Image (cartoon, rainbow, N blue to C red):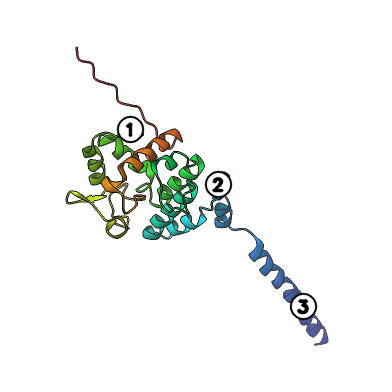
Amino acid sequence: MIRYSIIKKLALTVLLSVLPLNMVLAQSTPTKNDEADAALISPVTQIDYAPLRILLATQQWRQANEKTIELLLQATGRAKQGWMPPESLKKISCWDLKTIDDLWREYSNNRFGFSVQFPYFVETGNRPGRLVDVEAYQKFGDRIGWRNNGDWIVFKEDLNFSLDAPTGHLPAPRQEYQFAGGRLEYTTLAQTMVSCGLVTYTPPQPSIIP
């Protein structure tokens, strides 16, 4: 009986000494998400893209779109001003732009993202870095659901924040006061996509008249 009591006390002592250690180890051991989030800090701008990843992973599309605009403002050095002139979009680092695009593509199963929008931008007659006729950009807006009944939608209110939205519908970086759907800004952004290698683009060859 005494022997059993001693063994029981020893077992309890061992258990109490091991449990706190296991708890500490569990708390201090990095998870896969922790490691992934650590890799989302830009080596160029030091901007943390983990909050965007979390919003996208939980399919909070509206909040993710707003966070994307916020991150673009930070990445272009325009956070204080709260708006982005076209020239600033030429200065965004490729790492930051690619990270935003990769996250949108990954968590939407390739339905959303800047590089997802780009083929529709070109197919509707637009050219990266060069303004063409307004009708071409309007067709682009029609194609990805940024226009409705012949007019540009109110982006913060009338966007479709779900996976039922047209392919390429999000993210939508257009600012509310921009006319013509932010045509100049998006055309500049498209050129940055090409320069950063997010997309490939071959300018159309002029037709030769015999």
Q: Specify which label sits upstream in the sequence, 3 or 1.
A: 3
Using the rendered view, name the quadrant where residue 82 is placed. bottom left
The residue shown at (37%, 58%) is 61
Q: Which residue is mark 3?
A: 13
Image: 156 above or below 44:
below
In terms of depth relative to the viewer, which is nearer, 7 or 182? 182
In terms of depth relative to the viewer, which is nearer, 64 or 183? 183
Question: Residue reaching furthest top?
Answer: 210
Q: 112 left or right of 12?
A: left
Q: 155 left or right of 68?
A: left
Q: Specify which label sits upstream in the sequence, 2 or 3.
A: 3
Question: Residue reaching furthest front?
Answer: 81
Image: 205 above or below 27:
above
Circle 1 crowding by C-alpha within 10 Å: few under 14, some 14–19, many from 20 = few
The dot on residue 45 is 2
The residue shown at (54%, 56%) is 33
Q: Are marks 3 and 1 in contact (CB under 8 Å)?
A: no
Assign the C terminus to one quadrant of the image. top left
The residue shown at (51%, 42%) is 95
Amino acid tagged 2? Thr
Assign the N terminus to one quadrant of the image. bottom right
Separation of disc 2 and disc 1 at Cα?
A: 28 Å
Separation of disc 2 and disc 3 at Cα?
A: 51 Å
Circle 3 crowding by C-alpha within 10 Å: few under 14, some 14–19, many from 20 = few
Q: Which residue is mark 1?
A: 130
Separation of disc 3 and disc 1 at Cα?
A: 75 Å
